[in-house]
Image (tube, coloured by chain):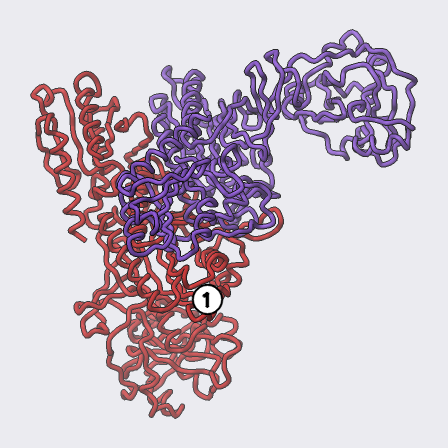
Chain colours: A purple, B red
Amino acid sequence: MPTLWTRTLIPTSREAPADAEVPSHQLLMRAGMIHRLGSGIYNYLPLGLRALHKVMQIIREEMNDAGAVETLLSALQPIELWHRSGRRNDYGDVLFVVTDQHGREQALGPTHEEAVTETIGALVNSYRDLPVTLYQIQTKFRDEYRPRFGILRSREFQMKDAYSFDIDHEGLDRSYAAMYEAYCRIFQRCGVPFVVVEAESGEMGGSRSQQFTVPAPTGEDVIFASDHGYSANLEKCATGPRDSDLGGEPTGEWAAIDTPECRSIADLCQGWKRFAGSKLKPANVLKTLIYRRPDGHDDGVAPWAMVVVRGDHEANAEKVRQACGPGLKLAEDAEARTAGFPIGFVGPHAILGREDTDLYIDADAARGGFWVAGGNRDHVHVQHFNWHRDVLAPAGLADDAATLIHDLRNAIDGDPAPDGGTLKASRGIEVGQVFKLGTKYSRALDIEVMDDKNQRVAPIMGCYGIGVNRILAASIESDHGHDDDGIIWPATIAPYSFLITALKYEGNVQAAADTLGRDLEAAGYDVLVDDRDERPGVKFKDADLIGIPVRITVGARALSDGNVEIKARHGGQVQTVALDVAASAAVALLKSIGVATTAGT
Amino acid sequence: MPTLWTRTLIPTSREAPADAEVPSHQLLMRAGMIHRLGSGIYNYLPLGLRALHKVMQIIREEMNDAGAVETLLSALQPIELWHRSGRRNDYGDVLFVVTDQHGREQALGPTHEEAVTETIGALVNSYRDLPVTLYQIQTKFRDEYRPRFGILRSREFQMKDAYSFDIDHEGLDRSYAAMYEAYCRIFQRCGVPFVVVEAESGEMGGSRSQQFTVPAPTGEDVIFASDHGYSANLEKCATGPRDSDLGGEPTGEWAAIDTPECRSIADLCQGWKRFAGSKLKPANVLKTLIYRRPDGHDDGVAPWAMVVVRGDHEANAEKVRQACGPGLKLAEDAEARTAGFPIGFVGPHAILGREDTDLYIDADAARGGFWVAGGNRDHVHVQHFNWHRDVLAPAGLADDAATLIHDLRNAIDGDPAPDGGTLKASRGIEVGQVFKLGTKYSRALDIEVMDDKNQRVAPIMGCYGIGVNRILAASIESDHGHDDDGIIWPATIAPYSFLITALKYEGNVQAAADTLGRDLEAAGYDVLVDDRDERPGVKFKDADLIGIPVRITVGARALSDGNVEIKARHGGQVQTVALDVAASAAVALLKSIGVATTAGT
């Protein structure tokens, strides 16, 4: 039976709520697909849930075809698991933790590496039970400090997460490849354009990661693509060789300048005219960051690392870690000051006379020319800073200058790419990510299986995530995902394939609409019939708003000639077709949309 | 593609964990269908999840057919909703409450009356949008103090909950009837035997409720059925007329007996021989309970209610509320003692001289004969208590004796039924319940819609719940749901319809197993192939344990004659059939089981 509009719940509205900043949030609310129950907490209403279920079904089919096995792990997780993996602190306040009647803490799972590792450890003993890839489609929880963008950054959301367990790295490569390919098929079938870029796996503890991103101007993620083929996200993106010259000549006399309260580069540049009588751009400032190495480091390793990047650049946390060593953290103000680094006013010459601090300079900061740097005293900066004169020569580092230079900053648009091309930046929405985890979790949770030589070994893991509801939002945010009138759903994930708009649902119009609906359902499609007692204008406006791919209009006038009208939601013209071929014409129209959308990826 | 045993995760074991008290818990664990991650927290492994999904699919189809509309409300619920409904206190510690980063409390929904009422209130304005019944299938949370019986009483579980909204009570009657009938079809299709009994709606705030219960000797619920047709659960079950005689003659002289520390009837009866030199049965003791009426009661209503039941009977909370008035609570020890009731030693004559206490006597306690009652002093009881001599005559209540007598206790096996028959008690597992809620929630959360006379009215609600995972456990606990060897699944909810046991999965055995599997899948069934390198005995034992309805054994010897063997899990004999008709023979066998199971309900 086709669904009658009046028998379901589609509370459309003309106005979007004031807090809806992006089109997907505005349109999902206006189309009556989601409803906000609290901050970052959304109900899925019938239309929204239907679209969500279609995405889930596509995911399920492709996961099963790829040999993954569906499970459903508990959302509640004993907090001990998170302590044992070391992630209790990493997650911090984002982890929802509930205390039960017995005073024991339970995490509400934002992800399930710990839980699945513990489960496999309890149930699998032998290499003969491997490989296995488990997946689940589940409600996850994250206590976002500032939820936003509707279902793009909410505190409760739907994830597909999968975890592979292999006996060796070759096995992991196969499991990873199977998931990678399944992900490509999933996003293709969902009809969303996507790109795959290299991503950081550092935080998850693994050796490789790739991110699936839907290009969208409103996206929170920045990704880079080289015209020679390399691509990566902001956290990961390397740059090609950049010129540097630590031997450049001084531009003038070293001079200390009073810069009261100028702790940020923005403040400094704004006040510079007043302090020094000239203009100053962030690109002429050296930003000097102090990192603390983890306690218990090896003897001979300095406890502090000084990282210098150009004032208009951002240090990249993972690149810094790569250069300076694992476990590094940006120093707290207080500890750095105690150690003699006046945060806000530190300059590279602070390392002079210190054996406890290593120096790391980003290529763009490792040049000659006019520099302003911190004065190593509160409320003081220096101008005409020169690397050779002021740091390298007095520190005896001039011969080692080349070893101080690293890629330490976030890439920017136009940077040289590592493959020789040029990096182009764009924005997108992350919808999936795949990771080679290695043994981080199997070792942390101390699980082992017997290999074929009767040795106990830690299984090699991969993990693979898809933000299920993000696919809905990303589809809307992407090219051709919406227009001024509303949502434009890809055929495969639309809540219904067909909307039959009965101009007045009575008499022979009702009979024709019902028959058409039943014929389309018999052919395997789902159908919504607008049977409301509303003016045609209201119905057409709502039809465009909810974005069903093909609309069939049944009205008394056309019907008196034996006709109905069909129209594709996206760029379609109204076609008049005879009622007796309307179902097949509508299906043909739908299929033409489906192909076009998929081919666009 | 049929599932290969070695490519999924079925960790069977010979031993059940020590804490598994009932067959469903033991067998679901042993069959590798669930795994315990923490107290009352279970993972669903592939086989268990497949069975769960089959139940969900049946529920979804029947809900849709009944006109209900699927939604997915958030699990997180702002705690204010629970304060507004007044249920924050009612639920108490069983409600999981998590505090977010902003210090705001969120409940983890054990049920969604508040959330759905709030949602409908925000989205529906007019009677023209009603009736609507929303349902969802969702993970729910309850912080059980003592989780037990595996997935029967766990802290995280799967519920189907539905909520109907109507403009008037006739509408509610229709919505309720539609859900009632859908529930009957759901349990029939799931192949579980069930009975429907009247249930209490008091706690939920409504006017009628019925409970769907699967008979099982291990069940936590007690239900009653009269041979004349009436049936109800323990909380609800009324009794027919019981004789009473408050005018009976004294059996002897009133005598106070020292009964040190005998606060319970068990202790009293055990010590009576020592204290009084004779035997005492609980049926000869009057149990006197003191209830406190809610604050702010009307003038003229006594603040205390004294309820007297026979020592071997249990007072029924709802019957007491019905007799004595709403909002009544069993008095705390301290407040009762302050008011002069020495809890543990109170006797009915405590009302003498008090105007602040009303007396309510259960029929079985309202008789003559030998009674022991509390002595109204600590560590003292009295014997030869007589209602007329010791309470009614001195209190001037003798003429009103009949008005003091009520049905106040839980029914017991053999009681007269209200329909004139006799009540028979049995045990069962509650799998569903339907409620007429009325306006409790719509009024508490202050939601209204416009009726057809342009008046704002509170929608009339019903709510309808099914414990999805309980159906799996109840099926196992019920008649024919298991035997000594393992689980016996009904055909409709079994993880797979067919198990092909390949005695040695290689050569022509493998080819025959694969072909059979593909043929059965092409016919629309799901198939598991045991391809393990294990002895036949191990495979047959595991086959019985996991309980797939039809097993097809493919072995080299039978195959050399062109044969395979088929066998029904429940009471089946091994039949030898030719390979080329094996698929159709297996399907015929499966269908015969399906019918038998359903007919048994």
Q: Is residue B346 above or below residue B233?
A: below
Q: Is residue A306 above or below residue A540?
A: above
Which structural element holds mark 1?
strand
Residue A431 vs residue B49: left or right?
right
Q: Indicate the quadrant containing the N terminus of chain B: top left, top right, bottom left or bottom right.
A: top left
Q: Residue at x 18, y 26 (%)?
A: B516
Q: Residue at x 73, y 14 (%)?
A: A404
Query: Measured from the top left, where is residue B158 in percent x and y?
Result: 38, 47
Query: Measured from the top left, where is residue A385 in percent x and y?
Result: 85, 19
Which amino acid lies under the numbered mark 1 shown in the image of this protein?
Met
Q: Nearer the viewer, residue A351 or A370?
A: A370
Chain ID at mark 1: B
Residue B105 vs residue A461: left or right?
right
Density class for disc 1 (Cα within 10 Å; few <14, some 14-19, many ≥20) is some
Where is residue B280, by image quadrant? Answer: bottom left
Q: Nearer the viewer, residue A507 or B595?
A: A507
Q: Residue at x 55, y 58 (%)?
A: B80
Q: Is residue A39 above or below residue A584?
A: below
Query: Measured from the top left, where is residue A180 in percent x and y?
Result: 44, 23
Residue B496 vs residue A264: left or right?
left
Residue B224 vs residue B113: left or right?
left
Q: Which residue is mark 1?
A: B450
Query: Measured from the top left, where is residue A504 in percent x and y?
Result: 36, 55
Q: Can residue A107 be seen by looking at this rendering? A: no
Q: Nearer the viewer, residue A373 or B573?
A: A373
Q: Can residue A486 be seen by looking at this rendering? A: yes
Q: Nearer the viewer, residue A269 or B189?
A: A269
Q: Residue at x 67, y 12 (%)?
A: A241
